Image (spheres, rainbow, N blue to C red):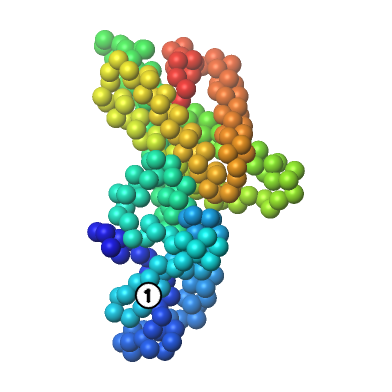
């Protein structure tokens, strides 16, 4: 087992074989009925075929672990429980569906809100930095500094509204598509978490700004493409949807987001502020 692999196994993910058979160590406290019920109700997913599973591994006596085999595809339910987190991250960057299923279904990650806030701050900083370059003042006084600070807060609010419009466009399309196909409505909470986690590529905006060079605009566009690709894969994994449906969902989100951008342009805010940024950037 690789380094960090066994450390990545969450308590409760497996079934202690010895305790089930009544052969567990008497020094280990017995699980409460509430904890046992919670463990039984926990559902995992096979990272290969997306079928539900009740456990990821079995914990035998003396720390002997055996990964559970999926009854549908006859492959390990989740091989990533033995992998180092760095390997999992690399596979997620490569947009592998198996890595996405492991992260979304078989782990407990509660960084959605913090990651979303940090990504929005990065996006607001990018726009604010572009605004400062277009409105430089050789002798700024306190009033101008306060105005620039207000611009940052305003751009943060704009970025938040645009992202909300993007997500609403995706949710609306998937809801209508499932209703037309007479399928079960999508789990919007799970989908929202997946979209927030898959937007981690926006963190690359800050390095792109810090190490500015002649191809900065190209780097920003590539980051945008990477984020959309990650969102596309998150929809496929979470909704178990086809590539066509996932692509149309992303397109719906982009269309609604573009509509919001157009409305901001029609508001005719300060020259060199939002309008100039929207016309020159995709973010």
Specify whether 139 is left or right of 113. Answer: left
Q: Which residue is mark 1?
A: 59
Q: Position of residue 151 (x, y in %)?
A: 41, 23
The residue lying at 35 percent from left, 47 percent from top is 89
Closest to the observer: 216 or 77? 77
Q: Position of residue 217 (x, y in %)?
A: 37, 19
Mark 1 residue element: strand
Specify whether 122 is left or right of 154. Answer: left
Task: Give the crowd class for mark 1: few <14, some 14-19, many >=20 residues within 10 Å.
Answer: some
Answer above or below: position of 124 versus 232.
above
The residue lying at 53 percent from left, 48 percent from top is 237
Specify whether 229 is left or right of 79. Answer: right
- Say which quarter of the image contains residue 280: top left
Q: Position of residue 201 (x, y in %)?
A: 39, 36
Query: Visible in this render: residue 14?
Result: yes
The residue lying at 33 percent from left, 87 percent from top is 25
Query: Visible in this render: residue 141?
Result: no
Closest to the observer: 53 or 26? 53
- What count of labels does the image hold? 1
Q: Dividing the image into 4 quarters, which one contains the N terminus?
A: bottom left
Closest to the observer: 108 or 16? 16
Answer above or below: position of 38 versus 195.
below
- The residue furthest front is 74
Answer above or below: position of 233 versus 132.
below
Q: Position of residue 39 (x, y in %)?
A: 48, 72
The residue lying at 32 percent from left, 75 percent from top is 64
- The residue furthest top is 138
- Say which quarter of the image contains residue 241: top right
């Amino acid at each position: 087992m690789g380094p960090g692999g066994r450390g990545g196994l969450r308590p409760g993910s497996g079934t202690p074989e010895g305790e089930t058979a009544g052969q567990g160590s008497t020094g280990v406290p017995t699980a409460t009925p509430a904890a046992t019920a919670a463990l039984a109700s926990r559902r995992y997913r096979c990272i290969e075929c997306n079928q539900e599973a009740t456990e990821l591994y079995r914990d035998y006596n003396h720390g002997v672990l055996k990964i559970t085999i999926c009854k549908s595809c006859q492959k390990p339910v989740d091989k990533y429980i033995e992998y180092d987190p760095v390997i999992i991250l690399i596979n997620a960057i490569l947009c592998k569906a198996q890595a996405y299923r492991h992260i979304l279904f078989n782990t407990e990650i509660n960084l959605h809100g913090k990651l979303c806030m940090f990504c929005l701050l990065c996006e607001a900083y990018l726009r604010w930095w572009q605004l400062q370059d277009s409105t430089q003042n050789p002798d700024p006084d306190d009033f101008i500094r306060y105005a620039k600070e207000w611009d940052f807060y305003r751009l943060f609010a704009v970025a938040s509204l645009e992202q909300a419009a993007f997500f609403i466009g995706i949710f609306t399309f998937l809801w209508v598509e499932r209703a037309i196909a007479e399928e079960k409505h999508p789990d919007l909470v799970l989908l929202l978490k997946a979209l927030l986690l898959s937007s981690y590529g926006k963190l690359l905006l800050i390095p792109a700004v810090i190490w500015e060079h002649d191809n900065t605009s190209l780097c920003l566009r590539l980051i945008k493409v990477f984020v959309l690709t990650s969102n596309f894969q998150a929809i496929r994994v979470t909704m178990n949807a086809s590539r066509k449906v996932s692509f149309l969902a992303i397109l719906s989100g982009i269309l609604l987001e573009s509509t919001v951008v157009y409305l901001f342009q029609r508001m005719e805010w300060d020259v060199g502020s939002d309008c100039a940024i929207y016309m020159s950037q995709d973010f």
